[in-house]
Image (cartoon, grey):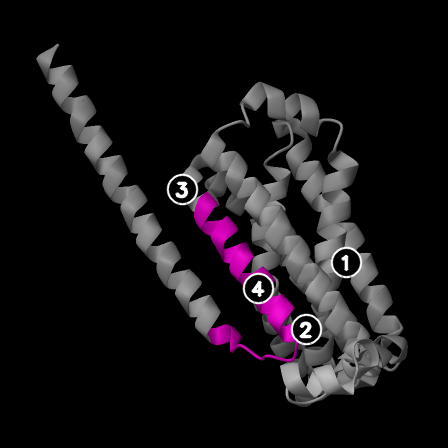
Amino acid sequence: MNLEIFLTAEAWMALLTLTFFEVVLGIDNIIFISIVSNKLPIEHRAKTRNMGLMLAMLVRILLLLTITWVMKFTQPLFMVSDIIGESLTNSWIGHDHPFSGRDLILMFGGLFLIAKSTREMNHEVEGDDEEGEVQSKASKNVANVIFQIILLDIIFSFDSILTAVGLTDQIIIMVIAVIISIGIMMIFSGRISDYIHKHPSLEVLALGFLILIGFMLFLEGLEYEIPKGYIYFAVVFSLLIEMFNIRVRGKREQKLKAKKAAKT
């Protein structure tokens, strides 16, 4: 391990840039973790979040250490014409399209995220997740929540790993950036989780955001690139509006309580 690279400004810039990208690309991951962990009993939430993030960090580091193997996932595995034939490919699509392992993983991850978020949103609308019932079921599903956290982290890792490879060829810098970013997630995931749980409207908004990310992942697997900046801007703007609404509702409730107290 060559630590002399940290004597250069380039290494520190690469580390700061990579850490920033890891945190930004991990925003959707934090939202997902907050929602699934909130289905657990209160005493299990923090422990499950931290355990899931620690295991996800180990998996991500393992992927970085096997970067040569991971990069093979970007190589084409088969063509559309191999499945439906050249004539149907030309008439339906107009051109042949290759599929790589990365494409299949992104498509699977997108569908999983859409299905999971849609199911959770349905529970919110139907109101069938009463606290006692949820906690009795969730106490048996800690391992399931941890598995979902790791699974989504692996899917989201492909973008961050490809970004890391484009910024530096030093594995040690990539690993340190992952450790720092996961540490930041562990610090803020609890606060974000509690805030989302306290405001149900934010949970619905977050689920809508995850559905949007799911569609983006699926389309990315089909080689349709959607600028992430547009999506993140829309989400941040919607989040700010909703937080403003929460504040307005809070003030109205305080005024109503004050009026009722004055009448009594």
What is the number of the mark on residue 57? 1
Task: Magenta stretch: give its range.
Answer: 204-229
Residue 22 visible in this rendered orientation of the protein:
yes
- Outermost residue on the top side: it is 264
Distance Cα–Cα, label 4 vs label 3: 22 Å
Earlier-in-chain disc, 2 versus 3: 3
State the residue position of label 4: 215
90 displayed left or right of 72: left
Residue 187 visible in this rendered orientation of the protein:
no
Q: Residues within 10 Å of mark 2 (few under 14, many from 20)?
A: many
Q: Please report contact status of discs 3 and 1: CB closer than 8 Å, yes or no.
A: no
Distance Cα–Cα, label 4 vs label 1: 25 Å
Residue 112 lies, with reference to residue 248, above or below; the image says below
User: Residue at point 70% right, 60% down?
Assistant: 109
Quadrant in the rendering for residue 137: top right
Distance Cα–Cα, label 4 vs label 2: 10 Å
Nearer to us: label 1 or label 2 = 2
